[in-house]
Amino acid sequence: MKFFQRSHTLPDSQGGFSLIEVLIGLVLSGLLMSMVAMVLGQSVTNNEVVRSSAGLSSRMFTLRRILHRDLQNIRPGRPIGVESRGFSLETSHNVLLEGAGPIVVNWDFSSNIIRRFEKSPDLEFENSFFLMRGLESWEMEFLDADKNIWISRSQQTARAASGQSTVKAFRLKLKFDDGQGVTIVERFPYATE
């Protein structure tokens, strides 16, 4: 009887990877995957920044357009009322009922948002629009028609109360909680040079 003996050694023709080669391959593939993850993460972040910026740009365009129309249709001889929460004016620009006659518009900058309220006492009509969120602070200045200097809203309020107020334009500075800021300058259509 013949017994077969098994050899515990591998023949030279059967190749494989050593433990060190496998570990080096794992480390290199891990580095490659981490670089891909960083690139994808940066891509997602950039995409969010672009979307946020585009959204802010679109909302800012709407805000400027409505504010411009309010001021271009302001009733001659009517003052702009400036308060701690915003300002009000009488205009013929009505968002929902175009050409419906004079309305009182209040721009409200309180509670970190920008809102526009319109009210027509003659038509018993009220409406409000939410325009933007994330407002950190706002500042309003007026261009004095006589001296060509910018004055603060408190100075303008004092001058308006005394009846000695003539302004050509106003400047509205908005600062948002994401660090972005916007300055809007609008001329009053009935201001005299």
Image (cartoon, grey):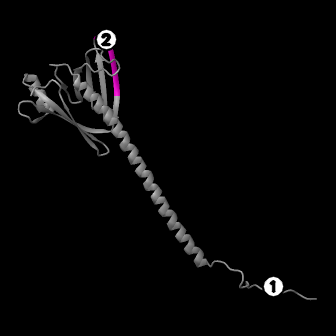
First in sequence, mark 1 or 2: give its number: 1
Instruction: Identify the magenta region.
Output: 122-129
User: Do the residues bearing badges 1 and 2 touch, measured as CB atoms within 8 Å?
Assistant: no
Residue in the image at 29% along x and 30% along y: 65
Residue 6's label in the rendered image is: 1
Residue in the image at 8% along x and 34% along y: 148
Q: Quadrant of the N terminus?
A: bottom right
- Check if residue 68 falls in the magenta segment: no
Q: Three-letter amino acid code at disc 2?
A: Leu
Residue 127 visible in the current orientation = yes
Which residue extends farthest bottom?
A: 1
Give x and y (percent) for residue 141: 16, 34
Give x and y (percent) for residue 108: 27, 29
**Disc 2, SS:** loop
Answer with left or right where residue 82 lies relative to residue 48. Answer: left
In space, the residues marked 1 and 2 are separated at their CA atoms by 105 Å
